[in-house]
Image (cartoon, grey):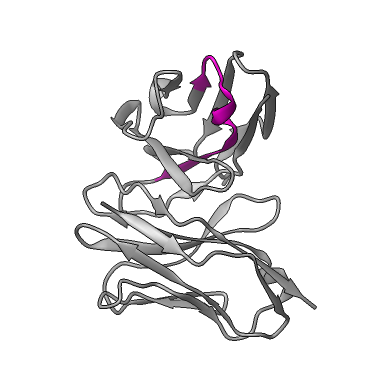
Amino acid sequence: GNSVTQMEGPVTLSEEAFLTINCTYTATGYPSLFWYVQYPGEGLQLLLKATKADDKGSNKGFEATYRKETTSFHLEKGSVQVSDSAVYFCALSVTGNNRKLIWGLGTSLAVNP
Amino acid sequence: EAGVTQFPSHSVIEKGQTVTLRCDPISGHDNLYWYRRVMGKEIKFLLHFVKESKQDESGMPNNRFLAERTGGTYSTLKVQPAELEDSGVYFCASSLDLSYEQYFGPGTRLTVT
């Protein structure tokens, strides 16, 4: 079946630190991969996505590369800010499956000044 | 353009009572999804509408849950009778078509006591 395994949090970093949140997946077919973010008091927002192997998604300084050989889609940012404090969710969808999203557990990130 | 809205934002009910959650998708979005996040677990897909038709309701937990989307606009999710394990955050998302991004509402936090 399809599933997403995501690094558990919470993660606490100081401002300007390097961030990695690990995400691996299992999927039948060729999934699209996503990172969603939920800021405090807000809904889920798409942060970035990649639709095929070796694609790199990027947004707001965050990056993730679709690695088919390691079935991974790790989220990285070179220098986090206090405003990046949020919960980050890795997810996948498979073509022909209504595009429903299969989710990881979510990783809470707190960035201290 | 208004985003996806959900009502209420928070509902507290007693076991055995009935609750109806509402989702208003972005205007013109034919696809509407319901998801649920139970505390400590991953977000789970509940069901998917295309216009007024249910395309996939494989994630609905049991027959105490009833979703409708009359007229293909807003959707309601009724839980009757509510049980303690129904507590969680219910998210609604909409998309223009299957190849497009899903836009999420802020969620409804349901607490069953």
Q: Residue furthest right?
A: A113
Residue B7 in the image: above or below residue A39: above
Q: To which quarter of the image does residue B60 belong?
A: top left
Residue B98 in the image: above or below residue A14: above
Q: Residues in magenta?
A: B78-95
From the top left corner, tell me how far across and down residue A34 is, in percent. 42, 63
- Specify whether residue B27 is in view: yes
- Specify whether residue A92 is in view: no
Query: Who's the residue at 22% across and 62% down the image?
Result: A30
Query: Who's the residue at 60% across and 85% down the image?
Result: A18
Residue A19 in the image: above or below residue B75: below
Query: Who's the residue at 36% across and 73% down the image?
Result: A72
Query: Who's the residue at 31% across and 28% down the image?
Result: B54
Q: Is residue B82 magenta?
A: yes
Q: Is residue B62 magenta?
A: no
Q: Which is nearer the eye, A105 or A101?
A: A105
Quadrant occupied by the C terminus of chain B? top right
Residue B26 is left or right of residue A66, and the answer is right
Q: To which quarter of the image does residue B3 belong?
A: top right
Number of marks in the rendered image = 0
Residue A5 in the image: above or below residue B45: below
Q: Which is nearer the eye, A18 or A62?
A: A18
Residue B39 is left or right of residue A95, and the answer is right
From the top left corner, tell me how far across and down residue A44 is, in percent. 56, 53
